[in-house]
Amino acid sequence: MAFSLKHAILPALVTLVVSSNAMASTKAYRGKILDFLDDPSAKPVLEENYRYYEDGALVVTDGIVEWMGPYSELQNNISSNVRVINYGDKLIMPGFIDTHIHYPQTEMIGAYGEQLLQWLNTYTFPAERQFEDPAHASKWSEIFVDELLRNGTTSALVFGTVHPQSVDALFESANKYSMRMIAGKVMMDRNAPDYLLDTPETSYQESKQLIEKWHGKDRLLYAVTPRFAPTSSPEQLTAAGKLLAEYPSVYMHTHLSENKGEIEWVKFLFPENSGYLDVYDSFNLTGPRSIFAHSIHLSDDEWSVMSETQSTIAFCPTSNLFLGSGLFKLDTAKENNVRVGMGTDVGAGTSFSMFETLNEAYKIMQLQGSKFSALEGFYLATLGGAKSLSLDDKIGNFEVGKEADFIVIDAKATNIQKLRNENSKNYLEQLFVLMMLGDDRNIYATYVDGRRVYSRKHANFKQGLKNFVNR
Amino acid sequence: MAFSLKHAILPALVTLVVSSNAMASTKAYRGKILDFLDDPSAKPVLEENYRYYEDGALVVTDGIVEWMGPYSELQNNISSNVRVINYGDKLIMPGFIDTHIHYPQTEMIGAYGEQLLQWLNTYTFPAERQFEDPAHASKWSEIFVDELLRNGTTSALVFGTVHPQSVDALFESANKYSMRMIAGKVMMDRNAPDYLLDTPETSYQESKQLIEKWHGKDRLLYAVTPRFAPTSSPEQLTAAGKLLAEYPSVYMHTHLSENKGEIEWVKFLFPENSGYLDVYDSFNLTGPRSIFAHSIHLSDDEWSVMSETQSTIAFCPTSNLFLGSGLFKLDTAKENNVRVGMGTDVGAGTSFSMFETLNEAYKIMQLQGSKFSALEGFYLATLGGAKSLSLDDKIGNFEVGKEADFIVIDAKATNIQKLRNENSKNYLEQLFVLMMLGDDRNIYATYVDGRRVYSRKHANFKQGLKNFVNR
């Protein structure tokens, strides 16, 4: 493994490719390449924040990025036994990272007519009940993982249900592909149907067992997952804080300030707190590994707490519109240096596709009179997501030594995309058109851990199962 | 031709099918069938406003609907020489009607970063300039019509450019398929680049010639088309009113109250008028055949004028979000008995697909705390659109004698659609899922004037050209 190489310097590359031992599997992927080094607005010179090559190459050995740069630099220095896979004018990008999604809601995506609280009662809770059955959980875990890969999403932060077996099923499905996946069992001990309630004690014990079993196993990570403040007693939130204190490397994943009715309810349930976020903060559930989905209606004080505690936000455009929750203030997050990732939030979100998610992010920003460029969108869907999950040392771009999760994008998957792409004046316009017109059809191939796990051409075959397929 | 049959009464059917003359072409299409008799909220008993058959049949002779009803009623009474095309569990619906779209903007769909007025200057006007060239206009007319048919849209109200040849090209392309299409040349004599300006006199003369040439030819109809108040002088608006007076059966098609900056500009340009709609009203441009795209920010007085003049509105969800224009008040339109149709408004709209358009209509309603059912959506996309274009005596549903424009929908075109469809408790839930998850892939076949003009299976072949293909 070649973690030692820090930057794409050619002599090192030559050495490395030549010196690869006989058992290592090195491949080079050629095509257009885009990745990000930082937020597009971080450095004043736009181009210093990302790398784009019209004819680039990505070199991968045993699931690790060895090199990325212009193909012309690689061409004459590559060992003849390294296979070059030429994707032509297709675009290679880091895999998408979905920072908020509910796998048990896959089966109820697009459920009619309600805003948050009624939607939970009418559709969500009955759907989640079925995950008590391990066979049901296993079936929908497989479907869910397939759908992620079909959409080019290689990592996700995922809600299970209250049942520990739901998390077992998901991790088992994800681990067949060596996915870097974060998930957790829902903690919920009040204000939901009896059949979905745990207790402070059982939720603590079950979460602890899941952490011991899964957190750090291969590429899997655990998130302590109270559903949201209204469905957890103070005792349960205390238990959640205790888990985080005992296991400082696990995540905290919950919902915050999605809907105005919800906010009023939290104020009623926690009258001693100054607001919704203060509830979580008072139970020590904020912090750099805490991800709060939505966070639409934050007060100035709450933005300060988000910033001071280095907590992060999952922005879920299609869900926020589908449930009529409101318009997320991305600009305010930036002003407060709060990390943000993109979330599809299926099943309240209406698509697994990060393209469709970014399309509606753009619209939410336009409704607020703000801009949202394709670079910003694809940054948030890749490195931005990795940063918001504190995984940017492992995934999110093609820096040498990172884990090789990447996608191959066909920007001309439909007639209108092809016409519009060819009618664009430069690659920035092409990227924007891709963001606005794209869907699952644009994902030509998905690679996880250096293995091809999805191919549009062979969409009906399972690929890349790590026990059966070499890299 | 069988215009005489008024309702689906079985004896008449038998007589008719048996008596079809040898030259007539009668076919029966079997499948699930949905059409509307009125707005789903018109009659208190929901089911009296639409017809749905799990196993239905649509009988078409020479481009005209002869009968629609349960297949069981047809089965034993159909002449053996009538071909039955069995679409199985696919859904047959009237073709979609797009009540506002700009065909010259097809090539610039998804143009980045601006709200209305800047977007026009930066992207739209340069794109429209190219339609001075008839070859360019002809090329994009063909592409545009193909894209409509691929998306199941069988009729549309279309903006051309200021060039009369742009309208000639569009009508020629539409007429190859006998489409019922309404279009017009833009009238625009100020506040745009010189290269796109006409004058009151030339716009009058050119529109008049186009009306004489095209209005009522086959299924084509003409719309007098001032772009919007800011780009027409009072003299030009007077000329537009004169055309409407001289040709009472032509349409009037323009934009209204899309963007707040635009509204301020109109107030500045027309200080003597009480508001934006009053400008059009004072030049006699309101009326039952006047369609105003957007109409987002209307005052109470303006709603009254819309209602009193029986003017109609094109609701364009993806465009209104893409340009950040605002949230259309569909409920207010209903309260005022103002007819509304759906518009994609490509190229400010981000999709030709009526499914994707209805998806965002739902979201716009949710953001306002209102509901929007699948029945309401599909009503607006079919009969509602026909009513708003005063074409409901000809198209919009399957009443006997209407023109046979229809689509065959595969509600299970993707993996997730299939799973979700099969996980639905009834057809209403299936229709909602279709509305939320659907796109061009769901259109299995499109029929115009009784001919199949698009088939997903043979998407690369031109079909249904009326000069070459029998019904």
Image (cartoon, coloured by chain):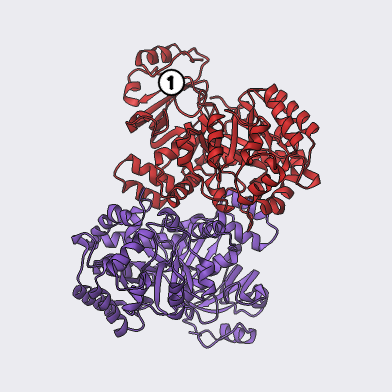
Chain colours: A purple, B red
Residue A110 in percent (x, y) is at 38, 51
Q: Is residue A111 left or right of residue B236?
A: left
Q: Is residue A335 left or right of residue B430?
A: right
Question: Which residue is most to the bottom?
Answer: A4
Q: What's the residue at 52%, 88% (across, down)? A: A4
Nearer the observer, B188 or B308: B308
Q: Is residue B83 visible?
A: yes
- Looking at the rendered structure, the kind of residue marked 1 is Val
Residue B112 in percent (x, y) is at 63, 57
Q: Is residue B365 left or right of residue B248?
A: left
Q: What's the residue at 40%, 61% (across, down)? A: A345
Q: Which residue is mark 1?
A: B82
Q: Is residue B122 left or right of residue A232?
A: right
Q: What's the residue at 55%, 79% (across, down)? A: A399
Q: Is residue A180 visible?
A: no
Q: Secondary structure at mark 1?
A: loop
The residue marked by circle 1 belongs to what chain? B
Residue A222 in percent (x, y) is at 33, 75
Answer with the quarter of the image where residue B430 lies. top left
Answer with the quarter of the image where residue A159 lies. bottom left
Nearer the observer, A305 or A181: A305
Answer with the quarter of the image where residue B196 lies. top right
Nearer the observer, B118 or B182: B118
Q: Relative to B196, is A177 above or below?
A: below
